[in-house]
Amino acid sequence: MPAVARGPRRRSLTWLQGLGCGAAVALVPAAALLLGVLLLPGMLSVAYDRQPGRPVARTVLLCGAAAVVAPAMALWNAGATIDASLALLGDLRVTGTAWSAAAVGWILAELAPVVALAVLETVTAARAARLRSERDKLASEWGFEND
Amino acid sequence: MAASPETLIAGRYAVQLGQPVPEAGGGLPCFVAQDHHTGDTGLIAIQVRRDAPARFHALQMLVQPIDGLLCPLAHGTAPAPRGDAGYFVICPAPPGPSLAGHLRPWPEAALISFALRPIALVLEKLAGHNLTHRAIRLNNVFQGGRGQPLVLGAAWAAPPAMHQPGLFEPPYSAMCHPAGRGDGSIADDVYALGVLLLALALGRVPMAELDDIAILRRKLEQGSHAGLVGDERLPPLISDLLRGMLAEDPEHRPTPTLLLDPGVARSRRVAARPPRRAQRPLSVGDVTVWDARSLAFALGIQYEQGTNALRSGMVMQWLRRGVGDAALASHVDELVRSRMADAPTEESRPDAMLLMRAVASIDPLSPLCWRGTALWPDGLGALLVAAAADPAVTVTLEDMVAAEAGATWANLRPDRSDLPLLRMEARQNRAWLATRGLAGGLPRLTYLLNPLLPCASPLLAGRWVTRLAEVPRAIEAAIAANPKTVPLDAHLAAFIAARGDSRMEAETNALTGTVQNPVGLPELRLLAELQVRQEAGPLPALAAWIVGAAAPMIALWSNRQRRRELTDRLKALAPAGQLLPMLVLLEDPSGRAADAAGARVAAAELNRIDAELLAISASNAQRRNAATRIGQEIAAGVGLVAFAAMLALAVLG
């Protein structure tokens, strides 16, 4: 395990996030409920993603957020009440879409590096083949076959 | 049958191999020769042996005929009896049979008029040319008929005195290897003439019952005159003359000029003392000696036993107490002590040097004795040739040359040697011997010291090549006869180096050929140089061979395409048989420089590619990380776009 260099000690912002969440629940409980449920996969991935910068959680949250825009607008138009929020949450299409988007984000975050690696390997192999061909030509032209 | 111009010697003399005249060559194979210009058949051709080269200096100097001597008219190659090439010296035929088969006692007047004076006159003329005969013996002296002066046979087809019986040689020459007797001095011919006069006066060969070694020992023990004449009764004039002519010391012998007036010559009395006989003998090896001269001889020819006798102190003790020569004993003792004081070593050279010094001190007239081989320094060349078949003697001579023994020996007897000349020759010989590379060492020294020695390269088997100009055509013929032959070996390289000039020497010194890679650029350069400078004409077989063996030279080029082009162009050039264009093509300094530069660039490019490939293979983890990062960024971007799109839709409505 690579040693982690100790940087300047950063103060934890968890209490600030808790304060923000508390404020949101207190001030806009309907929106907080809606977002909390629809973005639940994203928040779980934030909790479980230990990679620096949390790249998987980031993608899951962004995809989930994209699916939350429409329900959020609908809640707003419905007066931002707890009932409206519960009604939206009760609609499987809304919840399913949001969670599916989060799932797509997760799949994307997992598959994209594999695809990128495949592309990089292909490019590198092509370059190596071109170099080898060039080398063989030089060697045969100048008699370095045995080198 | 008409002889073709190629088989004529000097373009005019044909050797009649079907008409041998064995008694005319003084023991060497001899045939009737015919002059194609005049039709004269009164000539002989004396065949030269491969291992006994003809006397170059004498053949060069004797351009004018000398009455009473079979002077050389020409010399060169011609077919020999076995079908291969031979070398012959053309001379006038002798006027009659040799004395060997018709020995009878001659009266004093006949001896003076028909033997002494004519031969002394010949020797005087030879001495005027700075030459010696060194072949005055019964089978090489001829007489046209009774009352005719004697005629000396040819002595030019073999090294000086090589075929002389020990009887006719002074003891200090007879003890040498037959090929190592050297030109000697005219005094040696006077000695041989003295023996001839004695044989003619007696009508028989003196000491005929003894072999050469026994004759030599008797001469050393009793002195030549006493040993040869003994109690024989001779005419007084002849007896007086022989006393001087058979003197051990060459300086005590009368000159040929003096012999022309026997009356004066006989009055020149020589106070030659018989050797001092010891009271008791000394055994050196298997030789028992009674006097210092015999001791020097025994030490000189028996290296191991001689060294042991010297080291043990037996010699000094015997010289002091047996011979009674305390001064000589002290001198030898000093030499031995000096050697013993040296750091002990396994090398035999210091012992050889000690023995040589001791021999020269005990008998200053003795020849150079080195590890059991006796020779006169001017006989080194011919001896090297003769010793080629005897590795032990070859090693001895190589060691002697490397030690510059000739200079040391001359230094021990400065009044009897041309010290500066011998010193210079010794240094020069050592330098030649020390020349490294294909064309150096003993073969080169041998060819340098023997200008008429044919090249002994197996490539030229059956050919007699003595001149550089003959080499290219001989190689061409050898290659044409057997394309598997390699055109340049150590013997040929040494031969070319020896016969060529300084520029050619530089080329031969650069030769690097090996068995695996016999012909490289230096070899081709030398062959091309030979072809051009000797105006040898086209050599297509050799050129074709070089094309076949050019792979190592072409391999000096890096660019494969250029190699293919070179091969094609060489093949195109080969039929013309000119080596220089091929050399230019293969050498091409600017092309080689460009090729080398291109190869360097290619190598750098290759290294760069290798480094890049290495980096690619080493960057898997890096690439995986990058792919993860990129993938996550893309995923986040897609999410963001979706979110932004939904917001936009919500806002727009």
Image: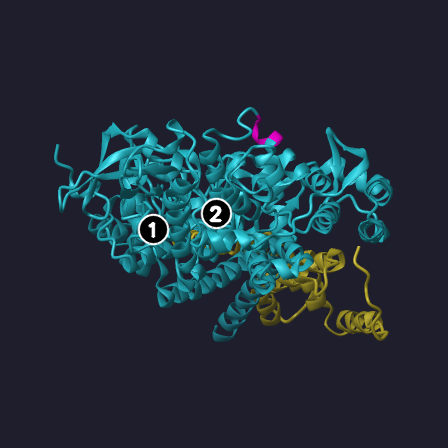
Chain colours: A yellow, B cyan
**Front: mark 1 or 2:** 2
Residue A25 place in picture, x, y as percent: 77, 69
Which region is colored magenta?
A: B210-214
Q: Secondary structure at mark 2?
A: helix
Q: Which amino acid does the dot numbered 1 rest on?
A: Arg
Q: Residue at x 44, y 59 (%)?
A: B505
Q: Which amino acid does the dot numbered 2 rest on?
A: Asp
> Quick check: B593 above or below B451?
below
Residue B50 place in picture, x, y as percent: 40, 38
Q: Is residue B198 left or right of residue B469?
A: right
Find residue A84 and report its image quarter.
Answer: bottom right
Task: Name the disc covering residue B633, or none.
Answer: none
Q: Nearer the viewer, residue B213 or B198?
A: B198
Task: Name the disc covering residue B189, or none.
Answer: 2
The reply to whether discs 1 and 2 touch (Cβ–Cβ < 8 Å) is no
Q: Chain of mark 2?
A: B
Residue B524 forms part of the magenta stretch: no
Residue B511 place in picture, x, y as percent: 46, 54
Q: Residue at x 12, y 36 (%)?
A: B2
Residue B432 shows in this picture: yes
Badge 1 is on which residue?
Answer: B467
| Main secondary structure along the magenta-highlighted residues | helix
Find residue B128 and report its image quarter.
Answer: bottom left
Q: Chain of mark 1?
A: B
Residue B157 place in picture, x, y as percent: 38, 42
Q: Residue at x 59, y 47 (%)?
A: B247
